[in-house]
Image (cartoon, rainbow, N blue to C red):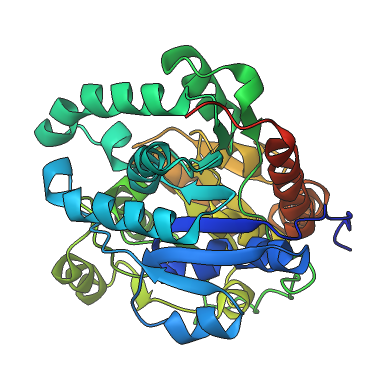
Amino acid sequence: MAERMSAPDLSGRTILYLVSEDWYFLSHRLPLARAAREAGARVVVATRINDDRATLEAEGFAVAPIPFDRSGLNPIADLKTLAEIRRVYQRERPDLVHQVAMKPTLYGTLAALMTGVPQVVNAMAGMGFLFISQGLKARLLRPAIRGAMGWLNRRAQVSVIVQNDDDRALFRDLLGVSDRKIATIRGSGVDVDALRPAEPPPISDDRPPVALCLSRMLWDKGIGELVEAARLLGARGVPLTVRLVGPSDANPAAIPRETIEAWVAEGLVEAAGKTRDVAGEYARSHIAVLPSYREGLPKSLLEAAACGRPIVATDAPGCREVCVEGETGLRVPVRAVEPLADALERLARDATLRAQMGQAARRLAEERFSIDRIVAETLALYDATLREPSPPQ
């Protein structure tokens, strides 16, 4: 069962969440915001509105539309975004803002400093495209972004949440953030009561094992390497279906739809697009795979673990926290096709190993990553932060 911990009293407080997309808030932060509301806080969600405003308002949250352009790399083009965030902060007068991912933390912290927000919590869900891409534009912008991130996150009223030890070391050693101002909270959590292991589907000559990659369709999620691994396994005669499930994305690393369609036409993969039926997808699969270049702590692997599926993932920050080599899964080097194919083949051919690793993954999800534990740790951080005296503005 999920671990239950008492919540602090947030009565009379306003907690504002700044995220780039409404769907992301619902998929990754809704249980936390509900817990803050139940602890007495007034909750405001500031985000780009797509289709989910009514859902947010039905939860009792105030909604503030923000014109985020997640694919943009030019801060000048985002001045209107910064101006709108500043207006929202002036109007809502939050006691604490919880900002998630790179662009919201950069522009949100600047707006918070301008408007005198007492406390800022910046949550980094991985280091993002600018810290991964080797493209010219990203490399040119990286020093300026790194400098801004360091300066903003060293402000007295700012606390930082990271999801893995590598990112903690990065903020401390590279960006100069005091270790006492950094909290390691491992991911957004998983509902281990709602997501439970299901018996894998039977395997036959007509129904080979299924390796499920539940992810946004981005090159830096290792999708290209996974497709090449599928090609290699096909050449070896290994029976395995690679299934891609996840949305396209307004990201510079997005894979063109035409490319995915060509892979499907070639018979290399199945591609199902976006889904809300995570439990059903894992119930129809035998292996979870995510060959990402870098993560914070991927929710899809937490969900895979909760569903009792063995994992193949890269030995990269974020992935290695869930994919424990030889216990919950098999790790492979980043950007390496042949080792990825070898790991998938090993699990595809060994039902006993799949079962052992799937059981270990479920135990890990229950012990370390339950949503109740993650929510309790985050609310405790809010409470401790709000008890600190506000620094001079």
**320 left or right of 150?**
right
Q: Can you say whether 51 is above or below 173 in the image?
A: below
Q: Quadrant of residue 60?
A: bottom right
Q: Residue at x 65, y 79 (%)?
A: 202
Residue 210 vs residue 159, the one in the foreground: 159
Q: Whole-percent x and y of residue 128?
A: 35, 41
Percent position of residue 119, x then y: 57, 39
Residue depicted at x 33% and y 57%: 87
Residue at 38% x, 45% y is: 108
Residue 144 lies, with reference to residue 47, above or below; the image says above
Q: Viewer-proximal residue, 104 or 365?
A: 104
Residue in front for this viewpoint, 229 or 291: 291
Viewer-side residue, 146 vs 77: 77
* 201 up-or-down from 186: above or below: below
Residue 312 in view: yes
Left or right: 176, with 236 as reference point: right
Horizontally, is 153 left or right of 251 in the view?
A: right
Horizontal and vertical percent for residue 210?
Answer: 52, 69
Residue 209 visible in the snapshot = no
Q: Split into 4 quadrants, where in the image is the N terminus?
A: bottom right
Figure quadrant of residue 284: bottom right
Q: Quadrant of residue 273?
A: bottom left
Q: Position of residue 21 (x, y in %)?
A: 38, 65
Q: Is residue 106 left or right of residue 278?
A: left
Tell me what residue is drawn at x 48 percent, y 34 percent.
Answer: 316
Total count of labels: 0
